[in-house]
């Protein structure tokens, strides 16, 4: 069941937020299925091991931590914007971080909260927009927006909000989909219509963001780009791995000067 609240941001700041109600509704309708590894979020489950290793390593590098320590992220306050069911919030909490997951869809946040509770993990979830957290003066050591920026209405404004939420000396990590012919063929035609990994209509190609555009937005927001890394699917082994190839899926990171 979808509450009408999802048509506005959960905090009521619809006019000032960067939320496209259609986008949020699409995800909210699937909220119950976040943790089904074979459900509509299967691709996120499949990429999770490799992206968690990537996130841990980047965060350890940014904050001079030892990635081999069991609780390598102890003491870091991390915001996960558009957290969905908490697929990343939970493992980062296990690594010792204090994680705040926000998502504009209330249904999604309820599912995330219940799942963390069931796992005995202390994750703070809130149905809120990034803009609302910035307005109340929150700031974090690291801010993540994973598979989110291709669903927001104004990338530049979103990145500038993210920059505002990041403490000086902090880190920003995004993951998204490039806007190339290859991403049209793979992320839309193959993933939505042939393999049916995700529901048709999940992505709009013209909302995809190139690494150059994202780096430009980082710089415009006063952040210093620190790298981009591709995430590629190998259909033969049915595995995902990190790569220099950013033609389809990629991570982009940035630092905020101290
Ligand atoms: C593809 S899911 C990614 C979920 C999670 N970050 C992950 O990677 O497992 C996109 C999420 O972004 C949320 N979302 C959509 N528009 C948003 C916006 N403007 N700001 C923040 N989150 C948004 C959706 O509700 C959905 O949960
Ligand atoms: Mg997406």
Image: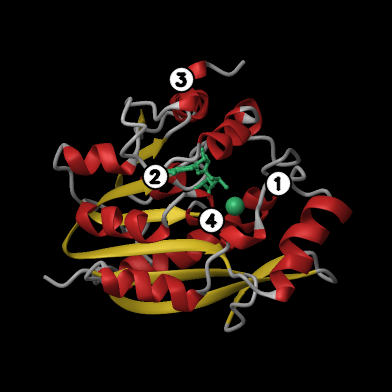
Which residue is outermost to the bottom? 244
- What crowding class fits label 3: few (fewer than 14 Cα within 10 Å), some (14-19), or many (20 or more)? some
Viewer-side label of 2, 4: 2
Secondary structure category for the residue under label 2: loop
Secondary structure category for the residue under label 1: helix
Q: Which residue: 81% across, 60% down? A: 189
What's the CA distance linking mark 2 and mark 4? 12 Å
Q: Is residue 208 above or below residue 25?
A: below
What's the CA distance linking mark 1 and mark 4? 18 Å
Q: Are marks 2 and 4 in contact (CB under 8 Å)?
A: no
Image coords of residue 161 (percent x, y): 27, 53
Q: Report the disc number at residue 18.
A: 2
Q: Which residue: 42% across, 54% down? A: 154
Mark 1 or mark 2: name the one nearer the start of the chain.
Answer: 2
Q: Quadrant of the C terminus?
A: bottom left
The residue that disc 3 covers is: 5
What's the CA distance linking mark 1 and mark 2? 26 Å
């Amino acid at each position: 069941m979808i509450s009408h609240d999802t048509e506005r941001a959960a905090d009521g700041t619809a006019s000032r937020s960067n939320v496209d109600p259609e986008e949020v509704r699409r995800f909210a309708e699937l909220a119950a299925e976040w943790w089904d590894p074979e459900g509509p979020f299967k691709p996120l489950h499949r990429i999770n091991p490799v992206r968690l290793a990537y996130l841990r390593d980047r965060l350890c590098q940014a904050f001079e931590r030892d990635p081999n320590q069991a609780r390598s992220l102890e003491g870091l306050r991390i915001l996960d914007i558009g957290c969905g069911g908490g697929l990343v919030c939970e493992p980062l909490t296990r690594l010792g971080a204090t994680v705040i997951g926000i998502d504009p869809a209330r249904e999604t946040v309820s599912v995330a909260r219940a799942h963390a509770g069931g796992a005995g993990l202390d994750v703070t979830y809130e149905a809120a927009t990034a803009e609302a957290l910035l307005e109340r003066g929150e700031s974090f050591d690291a801010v993540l927006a994973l598979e989110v920026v291709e669903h927001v209405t104004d990338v530049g404004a979103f990145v500038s909000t993210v920059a505002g939420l990041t403490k000086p000396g902090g880190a920003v990590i995004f993951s998204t989909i490039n806007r190339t012919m290859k991403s049209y063929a793979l992320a839309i035609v193959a993933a939505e219509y042939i393999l049916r990994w995700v529901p048709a209509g999940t992505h709009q190609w013209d909302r995809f963001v190139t690494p150059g555009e994202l780096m430009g937005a980082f710089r415009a927001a006063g952040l210093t780009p620190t790298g981009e890394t591709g995430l590629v699917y190998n259909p033969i082994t049915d595995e995902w791995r990190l790569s220099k190839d950013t033609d389809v899926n990629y991570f982009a990171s940035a630092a905020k000067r101290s």
